[in-house]
Image (cartoon, rainbow, N blue to C red):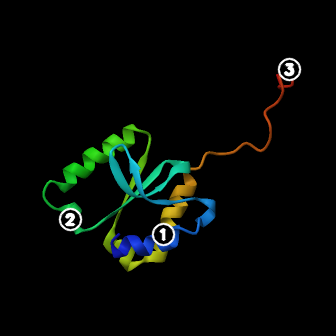
């Protein structure tokens, strides 16, 4: 793991807001830097190499495959993590939390008890 990945993992491994993150998560023939399975979110920490040569096109194809598999990919530049680790981690966790499904407040009404 790169330094930005190690630093980010220190923030995510404690299950912030009850969300469990995994590192080096294998998915569809790829390995994502981090994943929150509960909300089907993959997090990629992108170093400078992701801006060079064929890498952007490769990343776009990969993201499309993962998206088609029902996963959302969040790409974070490594420089952003190094510049503001706490703020970046907080924003990522808040985004993951926003993907949680809404939970109803109680059991659904029994058959025949619905209002007309």
Q: Secondary structure at mark 1?
A: helix
Q: Which residue is mark 3?
A: 112
The answer to whether residue 26 is above or below residue 46 is above
Q: Closer to the observer: label 3 or label 2? A: 2
Q: Closer to the observer: label 1 or label 3? A: 1
Percent position (x, y) of residue 44? Answer: 36, 59
From this viewpoint, which residue is outermost toward the left? 53
Q: Earlier in the sequence, mark 1 or mark 3?
A: 1
Please name whichever residue, 2 or 50, is drawn nearer the observer in this view of the structure: 2
- Residue at 44% of width from left, 71% of height from top? 8
Marks 1 and 3, how far apart at CA: 47 Å
Percent position (x, y) of residue 27? Answer: 39, 47
- Residue at 73% of width from left, 42% of height from top? 104
Percent position (x, y) of residue 50? Answer: 23, 61
Q: Closer to the observer: label 2 or label 1? A: 2
Marks 3 and 2, how far apart at CA: 61 Å
Q: Are marks 1 and 3 in contact (CB under 8 Å)?
A: no
Q: Quadrant of residue 69?
A: top left
Q: Quadrant of residue 83?
A: bottom left
Q: Residues within 10 Å of mark 1 (few under 14, many from 20)?
A: some
Q: Horizontal placement of 39 versus 58: left or right?
A: right
Q: Which quadrant: the C terminus?
A: top right
Q: Which residue is mark 2?
A: 49
Q: Which residue is mark 1?
A: 89
Which mark, by number, is residue 32?
Answer: none
Please name whichever residue, 32 or 51, is drawn nearer the observer in this view of the structure: 32
Q: Earlier in the sequence, mark 3 or mark 2?
A: 2
Q: Residues within 10 Å of mark 2 (few under 14, many from 20)?
A: few
Q: Secondary structure at mark 3?
A: loop
Q: Are marks 2 and 1 in contact (CB under 8 Å)?
A: no
Q: Secondary structure at mark 2?
A: helix
């Amino acid at each position: 793991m790169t330094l930005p990945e190690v630093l980010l993992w220190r923030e995510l491994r404690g299950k912030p807001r009850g969300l469990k993150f995994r590192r080096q998560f294998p998915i569809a023939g790829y390995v994502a830097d981090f994943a929150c399975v509960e909300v089907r979110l993959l997090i990629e920490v992108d170093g400078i190499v992701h801006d060079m040569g064929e890498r952007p096109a490769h990343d776009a194809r990969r993201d499309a495959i993962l998206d088609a598999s029902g996963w959302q990919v969040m790409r974070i530049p490594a420089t952003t993590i190094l510049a503001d680790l706490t703020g970046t981690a907080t924003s990522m966790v808040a985004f993951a939390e926003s993907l949680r499904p809404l939970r109803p407040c109680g059991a659904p009404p029994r058959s025949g008890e619905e209002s007309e």
